[in-house]
Amino acid sequence: GAVVSQHPSWVICKSGTSVKIECRSLDFQATTMFWYRQFPKKSLMLMATSNEGSKATYEQGVEKDKFLINHASLTLSTLTVTSAHPEDSSFYICSAGNNEQFFGPGTRLTVL
Amino acid sequence: GEDVEQSLFLSVREGDSSVINCTYTDSSSTYLYWYKQEPGAGLQLLTYIFSNMDMKQDQRLTVLLNKKDKHLSLRIADTQTGDSAIYFCAASGGGKLIFGQGTELSVKP
Protein backbone atom coordinates (compact mmCIF):
# COMPACT_ATOMS: atom_id res chain seq x y z
CA GLY A 1 0.00 0.00 0.00
CA ALA A 2 0.90 3.65 -0.17
CA VAL A 3 3.31 4.92 2.46
CA VAL A 4 3.33 8.31 4.10
CA SER A 5 6.18 9.31 6.38
CA GLN A 6 6.56 12.14 8.85
CA HIS A 7 9.66 13.68 10.29
CA PRO A 8 10.45 14.11 13.06
CA SER A 9 8.47 11.52 14.96
CA TRP A 10 8.80 13.56 18.12
CA VAL A 11 10.20 16.96 19.00
CA ILE A 12 10.64 18.96 22.18
CA CYS A 13 11.18 22.69 21.86
CA LYS A 14 11.28 25.81 23.97
CA SER A 15 8.41 28.24 24.04
CA GLY A 16 8.80 30.91 21.37
CA THR A 17 10.71 28.79 18.88
CA SER A 18 9.42 27.49 15.55
CA VAL A 19 9.16 23.85 14.61
CA LYS A 20 8.90 22.35 11.15
CA ILE A 21 7.23 19.00 10.53
CA GLU A 22 7.59 17.22 7.19
CA CYS A 23 5.09 14.93 5.54
CA ARG A 24 6.20 12.83 2.58
CA SER A 25 4.38 10.46 0.27
CA LEU A 26 7.04 7.87 -0.43
CA ASP A 27 5.65 5.87 -3.33
CA PHE A 28 2.97 8.04 -4.87
CA GLN A 29 2.34 11.64 -5.78
CA ALA A 30 -0.13 13.69 -3.79
CA THR A 31 -1.54 16.95 -5.05
CA THR A 32 -3.42 17.24 -1.79
CA MET A 33 -2.29 16.47 1.72
CA PHE A 34 -4.10 17.05 4.97
CA TRP A 35 -2.86 18.12 8.37
CA TYR A 36 -4.63 17.02 11.55
CA ARG A 37 -4.15 17.68 15.20
CA GLN A 38 -5.05 15.13 17.83
CA PHE A 39 -5.31 15.72 21.57
CA PRO A 40 -4.92 12.79 23.97
CA LYS A 41 -7.88 10.38 23.81
CA LYS A 42 -9.56 12.67 21.31
CA SER A 43 -10.54 12.59 17.69
CA LEU A 44 -8.56 14.06 14.83
CA MET A 45 -9.23 17.68 14.09
CA LEU A 46 -8.59 18.74 10.52
CA MET A 47 -6.40 21.83 10.54
CA ALA A 48 -5.85 22.49 6.87
CA THR A 49 -5.77 21.10 3.37
CA SER A 50 -2.40 21.47 1.71
CA ASN A 51 -2.50 21.97 -2.05
CA GLU A 52 0.58 21.52 -4.19
CA GLY A 53 1.63 24.76 -5.79
CA SER A 54 -1.01 26.91 -4.12
CA LYS A 55 -2.05 28.22 -0.75
CA ALA A 56 -3.36 25.89 1.91
CA THR A 57 -7.01 25.96 2.89
CA TYR A 58 -7.42 26.36 6.63
CA GLU A 59 -10.32 25.18 8.72
CA GLN A 60 -12.27 27.65 10.75
CA GLY A 61 -10.49 28.64 13.93
CA VAL A 62 -7.03 27.59 12.76
CA GLU A 63 -4.57 30.49 12.59
CA LYS A 64 -2.81 30.42 9.24
CA ASP A 65 -0.01 32.69 10.47
CA LYS A 66 0.58 30.36 13.37
CA PHE A 67 0.55 27.12 11.40
CA LEU A 68 2.37 27.72 8.13
CA ILE A 69 1.87 25.09 5.46
CA ASN A 70 3.99 24.70 2.36
CA HIS A 71 3.35 22.07 -0.30
CA ALA A 72 6.34 22.59 -2.53
CA SER A 73 6.27 19.33 -4.43
CA LEU A 74 3.97 16.41 -5.16
CA THR A 75 5.60 14.36 -2.44
CA LEU A 76 6.27 16.85 0.34
CA SER A 77 4.20 19.11 2.56
CA THR A 78 5.55 20.91 5.60
CA LEU A 79 3.80 22.31 8.65
CA THR A 80 5.66 24.96 10.62
CA VAL A 81 4.39 25.83 14.07
CA THR A 82 5.62 29.36 14.58
CA SER A 83 6.40 30.87 17.98
CA ALA A 84 5.27 27.69 19.65
CA HIS A 85 3.62 27.79 23.06
CA PRO A 86 2.80 24.98 25.50
CA GLU A 87 -0.80 24.91 24.30
CA ASP A 88 0.50 23.91 20.86
CA SER A 89 1.75 20.64 22.35
CA SER A 90 -0.10 17.90 20.56
CA PHE A 91 0.10 14.99 18.16
CA TYR A 92 0.18 16.20 14.56
CA ILE A 93 -0.75 13.77 11.80
CA CYS A 94 -0.68 14.23 8.04
CA SER A 95 -2.42 12.23 5.37
CA ALA A 96 -2.33 11.99 1.59
CA GLY A 97 -4.31 10.19 -1.06
CA ASN A 98 -7.39 10.42 -3.20
CA ASN A 99 -10.27 8.07 -2.42
CA GLU A 100 -8.16 6.42 0.25
CA GLN A 101 -6.27 8.62 2.63
CA PHE A 102 -3.03 7.19 3.93
CA PHE A 103 -1.81 8.54 7.21
CA GLY A 104 1.64 9.30 8.42
CA PRO A 105 2.80 7.92 11.77
CA GLY A 106 2.35 11.28 13.48
CA THR A 107 4.66 13.78 15.18
CA ARG A 108 4.51 14.34 18.92
CA LEU A 109 5.27 18.00 19.68
CA THR A 110 6.02 19.06 23.22
CA VAL A 111 6.57 22.74 23.90
CA LEU A 112 8.23 23.54 27.20
CA GLY B 1 -21.63 20.20 8.24
CA GLU B 2 -21.01 16.50 8.64
CA ASP B 3 -21.12 15.12 12.13
CA VAL B 4 -19.88 11.63 13.00
CA GLU B 5 -20.64 9.99 16.33
CA GLN B 6 -19.29 6.87 18.01
CA SER B 7 -19.57 5.30 21.40
CA LEU B 8 -16.36 5.85 23.36
CA PHE B 9 -15.61 2.46 24.87
CA LEU B 10 -16.12 -1.22 24.18
CA SER B 11 -14.80 -4.12 26.22
CA VAL B 12 -14.92 -7.73 25.01
CA ARG B 13 -13.33 -11.05 25.86
CA GLU B 14 -10.77 -12.65 23.61
CA GLY B 15 -12.45 -14.83 21.02
CA ASP B 16 -15.74 -12.92 21.12
CA SER B 17 -16.98 -10.71 18.31
CA SER B 18 -16.71 -6.94 18.65
CA VAL B 19 -19.19 -4.57 17.08
CA ILE B 20 -18.32 -0.89 16.88
CA ASN B 21 -21.07 1.46 15.80
CA CYS B 22 -21.02 4.83 14.12
CA THR B 23 -23.63 7.30 12.93
CA TYR B 24 -23.17 10.14 10.50
CA THR B 25 -25.35 12.97 9.30
CA ASP B 26 -24.41 13.74 5.69
CA SER B 27 -26.17 11.31 3.37
CA SER B 28 -24.04 12.48 0.46
CA SER B 29 -20.86 10.96 1.91
CA THR B 30 -19.42 8.84 -0.85
CA TYR B 31 -17.07 6.71 1.18
CA LEU B 32 -17.11 5.62 4.80
CA TYR B 33 -13.97 4.41 6.47
CA TRP B 34 -12.72 2.54 9.49
CA TYR B 35 -9.28 3.33 10.87
CA LYS B 36 -7.32 1.74 13.71
CA GLN B 37 -4.95 3.68 15.93
CA GLU B 38 -2.58 2.02 18.34
CA PRO B 39 -1.03 4.07 21.18
CA GLY B 40 1.40 6.72 19.95
CA ALA B 41 0.95 5.75 16.32
CA GLY B 42 -0.76 7.13 13.25
CA LEU B 43 -3.92 5.79 11.72
CA GLN B 44 -4.09 2.54 9.84
CA LEU B 45 -6.82 2.16 7.25
CA LEU B 46 -8.69 -1.06 8.02
CA THR B 47 -11.39 -0.98 5.42
CA TYR B 48 -13.82 1.28 3.66
CA ILE B 49 -17.19 0.95 2.02
CA PHE B 50 -18.68 2.79 -0.89
CA SER B 51 -22.02 4.40 -0.12
CA ASN B 52 -23.96 2.24 -2.58
CA MET B 53 -22.93 -0.94 -0.78
CA ASP B 54 -24.67 -2.56 2.17
CA MET B 55 -21.93 -4.84 3.35
CA LYS B 56 -18.27 -5.55 2.86
CA GLN B 57 -16.32 -8.42 4.33
CA ASP B 58 -12.57 -8.67 4.57
CA GLN B 59 -11.26 -11.63 6.55
CA ARG B 60 -12.26 -11.01 10.19
CA LEU B 61 -13.78 -7.64 9.43
CA THR B 62 -17.37 -7.04 8.33
CA VAL B 63 -18.69 -3.58 7.60
CA LEU B 64 -22.42 -2.99 7.50
CA LEU B 65 -23.92 0.19 6.12
CA ASN B 66 -27.53 1.25 6.66
CA LYS B 67 -27.75 4.28 4.46
CA LYS B 68 -31.36 5.03 5.39
CA ASP B 69 -30.46 5.31 9.07
CA LYS B 70 -26.95 6.68 8.35
CA HIS B 71 -25.50 3.95 10.50
CA LEU B 72 -22.20 2.19 9.98
CA SER B 73 -20.81 -0.71 11.97
CA LEU B 74 -17.58 -2.65 12.10
CA ARG B 75 -17.66 -6.23 13.30
CA ILE B 76 -14.41 -7.93 14.27
CA ALA B 77 -14.76 -11.69 14.50
CA ASP B 78 -12.66 -13.72 16.94
CA THR B 79 -11.30 -10.61 18.61
CA GLN B 80 -7.70 -10.90 19.77
CA THR B 81 -5.70 -8.93 22.34
CA GLY B 82 -3.79 -7.39 19.44
CA ASP B 83 -7.03 -5.79 18.31
CA SER B 84 -7.01 -3.53 21.36
CA ALA B 85 -6.79 -0.01 19.98
CA ILE B 86 -8.90 3.03 19.18
CA TYR B 87 -11.13 2.66 16.15
CA PHE B 88 -12.26 5.68 14.19
CA CYS B 89 -14.99 5.84 11.64
CA ALA B 90 -14.78 8.62 9.10
CA ALA B 91 -17.06 9.96 6.42
CA SER B 92 -15.97 11.71 3.27
CA GLY B 93 -17.49 15.09 2.64
CA GLY B 94 -16.41 18.06 0.56
CA GLY B 95 -13.11 16.42 -0.25
CA LYS B 96 -12.32 16.00 3.43
CA LEU B 97 -12.60 13.28 6.03
CA ILE B 98 -14.70 13.91 9.11
CA PHE B 99 -13.82 11.64 12.01
CA GLY B 100 -15.83 10.31 14.88
CA GLN B 101 -14.47 10.57 18.41
CA GLY B 102 -13.02 7.09 18.31
CA THR B 103 -14.05 3.93 20.15
CA GLU B 104 -11.50 2.47 22.52
CA LEU B 105 -11.66 -1.31 22.22
CA SER B 106 -10.32 -3.26 25.16
CA VAL B 107 -9.87 -7.02 24.72
CA LYS B 108 -9.56 -9.04 27.89
CA PRO B 109 -7.88 -12.45 27.88
Image: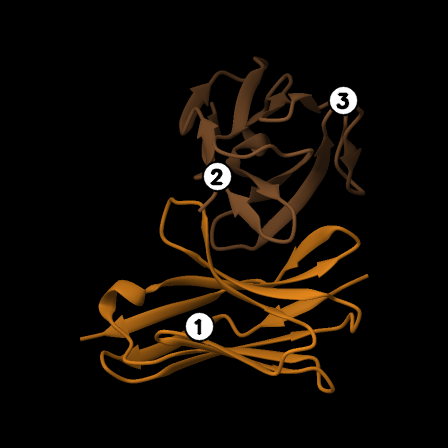
Picture coordinates of residue B42, whole percent (x, y): 44, 45
**Amino acid type, residue under disc 2 in the picture:** Gly
Vertical comparison of A11 with B96: above or below: above
Q: Kindly report the distance in space between the C-alpha atoms of the residues bearing marks 3 and 2.
A: 21 Å
Q: Quadrant of residue A68?
A: top right
**Amino acid type, residue under disc 3 in the picture:** Gly
Judge depth for marks 3 and 2 and give the one in front. 3
- Residue in front for this viewpoint, B94 or B24: B94
Q: Pointer 3 indicates a residue of which chain? A: A
Q: Which chain is orange?
A: B
Judge depth for marks 1 and 3 and give the one in front. 3
Identify the mark at residue A53; answer none if there is no mark: 3
Instruction: Give the number of marks.
Output: 3
Q: Which chain is brown?
A: A
**Amino acid type, residue under disc 1 in the picture:** Phe
Kindly indicate whether the residue at mark 1 contacts the one at mark 2 (C-beta within 8 angstroms).
no
- Residue in front for this viewpoint, A24 or B100: A24
Circle 3 residues within 10 Å: few <14, some 14–19, many ≥20:
few
Q: Pointer 2 indicates a residue of which chain? A: A
Please tell me which residue is depicted at 59% across the width and 14% down the height of the picture: A16
